[in-house]
Amino acid sequence: MSIGHTLLGLLESGPRHGYDLKRTFDEKFGQDRPLHYGQVYSTMSRLLKNGLVEVDGVESEGGPERKRYAITDAGITDVSQWLDQPEKPEPYLQSTLYTKVVLALLTGRSASGLLDTQRSEHLRLMRILTDRKRKGDLADQLICDHALFHLEADLRWLELTAARLDQLAKVVTP
């Protein structure tokens, strides 16, 4: 995810302080990975330097100064271009899981056991996500669906690989 573009998009509804941007980002996108304040402010500093945002005001109200940021026309154009650009599908051709299976075969360990353990972990996470989806709002349901579909694809791969372990062992072992 492009944090800079996401923060720019949030600014399109009006000027905000860094704290407000972080809070809104975390509510909408970061439930599982909230932004750090330093990440927000370093990103805003870069966007300011690149002319995509401007300081709309500074307030102190008895505490430290708080900058209020506003998106510029260049920032709006940048967000529009980013939204119009399709994301590159990730083929996962260098999978850590595949590497572990091959290494297990090469070192005489149980690749089958590794796949079983991984299958159990995927199923455990799928149960958690399914429960979260059941209790969540529409945004949470869509996020969980995305993750669940990827996990289902992984499970299919685990089953296929388990069925082909003997063939794979002949190919990868000397």
Image (cartoon, grey):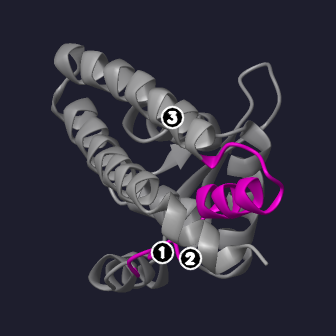
Crowding at dot 1, Cα within 10 Å, few <14 / some 14-19 / many 20+, comes out as some
Dot label at residue 52: 2
- Element under disc 1: loop
Q: Where 132 sits versus 167, above or below?
A: above
- The circle on residue 12 is none
**Disc 3, SS:** helix
Q: Judge whether residue 73 can be spotted in this image.
A: yes
Pointer 2 with pointer 1, Cβ within 8 A: yes
Pair 1/3: label in front: 3
Instruction: Give the residue number, with chain letter if any, for mark 1.
Output: 72
Residue 116: assigned label? 3
Question: Can residue 31 be seen from the camera position used here?
Answer: no
Q: Quadrant of residue 49?
A: bottom right
SS type, badge 2: loop
> Left or right: where does residue 20 sit relative to residue 94?
left
> Mark 3: which amino acid?
Asp
Residue appearing at x 40%, y 75% in the figure: 79
Decide which of 148, 93 is in the foreground and name it: 93
Question: Do tag 2 and tag 3 residues touch (Cβ < 8 Å)?
Answer: no
Instruction: Give the mark nearest the N terminus, 2 or 1.
Output: 2
Q: Range of the magenta residues?
A: 88-111
Q: Position of residue 48 (x, y in %)?
A: 68, 70
